[in-house]
Image (cartoon, rainbow, N blue to C red):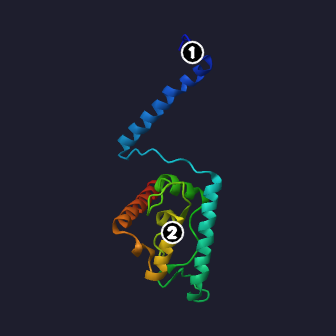
Amino acid sequence: FGAVDNMRVRVLPVLGTMPAIMGQAMAATTLCELGGKPFSPVGAERVGRNVRHRLYQHLKNREKKFEERHRPALKEGSDNYTTNGIYVGPIQIDPDDVEYLMAELWKNRCALSGERLGTVLELHRWDVGRPATPNNLVLMSVKSAQKFERDFDELGDGREGVDAEVRRKVDARLAMCILDAEDEY
């Protein structure tokens, strides 16, 4: 690149990296095509570490309260984590999984209402009979989460209060998470 009339010279170092970025994007697309995997770049904004940490802590605290409420139904000294079809035990994710769940799996949107980041979001177990793993956690707005918990208390399963079409979409998205986990090995 040469200097052009009325061009700021400070911009010249940036111009060299732009073709490199484009080449990287084309190479990623080609490799995905050859491997038979869909190319799906992350389109969601990154969320700060403090927000992810807060989300993780809220999940841990909620699961701990849930465990304290349902633990008495287990026999003393039992290694079993399931009581009356409800899993009672530790969560099986770490703070890094929260970023994956928010950005890649749920695209920073409430799974039930589609609300974006302007609202407060929380992770909830979709199926209380299974542990809190990435393929069983759903990102919900506080309002949707409260309704989900009310439906759990009243109907025995929070999913029963969710529209059938939304439920089908959430199950499909969680199935994608299972496929992603299998691809790592």
Mark 1 to mark 2: distance in Å? 54 Å
Q: Amino acid at mark 1?
A: Met
Task: Specify the farthest residue to the right.
Answer: 50
Q: Is residue 185 visible?
A: no
Q: Which mark is residue 145?
A: 2
Q: Is residue 166 visible?
A: yes
Q: Position of residue 22 (x, y in %)?
A: 46, 30
Please name the residue shown 51% across and 27% down the image: 18
Disc with the residue nearer the chain's start (1 vs 2): 1
Q: Disc count in the image?
A: 2
Q: Amino acid at mark 2?
A: Ala
Q: Position of residue 37 (x, y in %)?
A: 38, 47
Q: Which quadrant of the figure has residue 81? A: bottom right
Horizontal side of residue 76 vs 111, given as left or right:
right
Report crowding for label 1: few under 14, some 14 to 19, many 20 or more residues within 10 A (C-alpha).
few
Residue closer to the observer: 145 or 47: 145
Helix, strand or loop status at disc 2: helix
Q: Which mark is residue 30?
A: none
Q: Position of residue 101 (x, y in %)?
A: 51, 57
Residue closer to the observer: 178 or 101: 101
Q: Which residue is mark 1?
A: 7
Q: Which quadrant of the figure has residue 41? A: top left
Please name the residue shown 56% across and 88% down the image: 73
Q: Position of residue 78 (x, y in %)?
A: 58, 85
Report crowding for label 2: few under 14, some 14 to 19, many 20 or more residues within 10 A (C-alpha).
many
Horizontal side of residue 3 vs 32, given as left or right:
right
Question: Pointers 1 and 2 in contact (CB under 8 A)?
Answer: no
- Name above or below for residue 160 compared with residue 7: below
- Name above or below for residue 25 compared with residue 126: above
Helix, strand or loop status at disc 1: loop
